[in-house]
Amino acid sequence: MPSEVNATANAPAEPLAAGVLQVPPEWQAIDLIADLHLHPQDSGTLAALQAYLDSEQAQAASALIVLGDLFEVWIGDDALAAEPGPADLDGELAESVTFWNRCAALFARHARHRPIWFMAGNRDFLLGDQGLNACGMRRLADPTRLAFQGRNWLLSHGDALCLDDTAYMAFRQQVRRPEWREAFLARPLVERATMARNMRQQSQQHQRQLAGPEAWADVDGAAAIEWLRDAGCDTLIHGHTHRPGVHALAPGLERVVLSDWESGGPRPRAEVLRLDAQGWRRLPVPLPA
């Protein structure tokens, strides 16, 4: 991964090339989640997810849509087939491989009963077709226009609209290039894990310096309005910012921010956003004691 990138001030939003998800008319409800950041050191969040997926609440939905950052890090689909052993994997990576396979099995089991769509986030954009197949998930473009219950909803992870974070926007443009992806995935698995670990530590240090999500760059309102109008939608639903809420953008236009999930820390919370004939509503997910 690059050690530095050149930030450009006032970077424009990416041109809108929205995908379309047209669901069957008989569907009654769709659940959306984002920013679970699943990793082996947070067993509580995975337990909350498993409890939700097994609940009557989840079974009442016609489908589940994941809007990115399902995993804290994803270093390549081949990790699922890695054989833990002292010659190839260190202890932390071996633990991660076991954890990722456990998560994949959990999603695949749920997907046998209702479809799961996945949109890449800034942490798990390397999740490829092999990994999606293992999880029983289908890929969504970012953004995607969801045609459901007579309305058009615009779905996004949200990071592409955080234009004030110029350093990240430059980094994002670099790592989403096919040639960068190919070069990174060609490295040995252990090397990729080490690089991802270092980047995660740098990210955590940067977040601590910013004193919480309230200081992170937020979605650019003008860019969000442009996306909505271009897509013919009235509501943007996204994650990424870890600031659940609802924001009026312009007359008749709004953006709804999904909750992140975290079982510990200063802000333990987990939440599902449900879409149905009444619109949208938030459904809290109990966290393990």
Image (cartoon, helix red, strand yellow):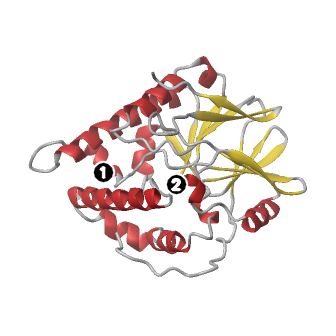
Question: Would you say 21 lies left or right of 100 here?
Answer: right
Pointer 2 residue: 121
Residue 179 percent across, percent down from the top left:
40, 73
Camera-nearest residue between 44 and 113: 44
Question: In the displayed image of the protein, which residue is found farthest to the left?
Answer: 87
Residue at image position (62%, 28%) is 284
Residue 23 percent across, percent down from the top left:
72, 40
Residue at image position (52%, 31%) is 111
Q: CA distance from mark 2 to mark 1?
A: 19 Å
Q: Residues within 10 Å of mark 1 (few under 14, many from 20)?
A: few
Residue at image position (18%, 44%) is 91
Point out the image quarter for the N terminus. Answer: bottom left
Kindly identify the amino acid type of the residue bearing the numbered disc 2. Answer: Gly
Pointer 1 residue: 78
Kindly identify the amino acid type of the residue bearing the numbered disc 1. Answer: Asp
Counting residues from the N terminus, which is met first, the one under dot 2 or under dot 1?
Answer: 1
Which dot, 2 or 1, sits closer to the camera? Answer: 2
